[in-house]
Image: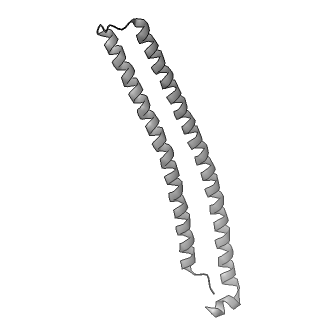
Amino acid sequence: MSIGGSSLRVMEVEIDEKSIGEKKMLESFYRRASEAEERLARLEATIALKQDESNNGSDKSSQEISSMVDHFKSNLDIAQNDLTTEREKAATEIKKLVAENAKLRYRISHILRALREIDHSSPLLNQDA
């Protein structure tokens, strides 16, 4: 009934699986941030296109163009605020996960140490092996 190296390896594999899960969660945050940046780029391109049209003698009044630019700027501000909010949420979540991970690693190290002490100190367990 000795605690062997195989059970220690199983615990290490479980720790690695948790790290993979954390990475997948972070990937979703980065994907959403990337999508928001792409939306911003499209808005900026649309604004630049509209400004080029107005500079090339378009028949729209300057008032209409100004209102369109204002509309695009407000959409851009909204998208930037959304991106900032997502980044803050991701940073908060990362901090929580890092703290939880550290606590779990600490607990695991104490459990492993206790198991090793039991394994080495108990003559009854050593006789069964």
Model colouring: one colour
Residue 42 found in image quarter: top left
> 46 or 119: which is nearer to us?
46
* Front one among 74 and 94: 74
Q: Is residue 106 left or right of residue 21?
A: right
Which quadrant does the N terminus fall into?
bottom right
User: In percent of the image, x 36 and y 14: which residue is there?
Assistant: 51
Q: Residue at x 67, y 88 (%)?
A: 125
The answer to whether residue 69 is above or below residue 95 is: above
**For the point 48% across and 39% down, which residue is it?**
33
* Residue 7: % across, % down: 57, 77
Tell me the quarter of the picture where residue 43 sits. top left
Residue 30 vs 42, above or below: the answer is: below
Residue at the left extreme, as displayed: 56
The residue most toward the bottom is 127
Q: Is residue 20 above or below residue 93?
A: below
Where's the C terminus, which quadrant?
bottom right
Task: Where is residue 6? Give x, y as percent.
Answer: 54, 78
**42 lies above or below 121:** above
Q: Quadrant of residue 109?
A: bottom right
Which residue is drawn at the image coordinates 65% and 89% (left, top)?
126
Figure label count: 0
Q: Position of residue 78 (x, y in %)?
A: 53, 27
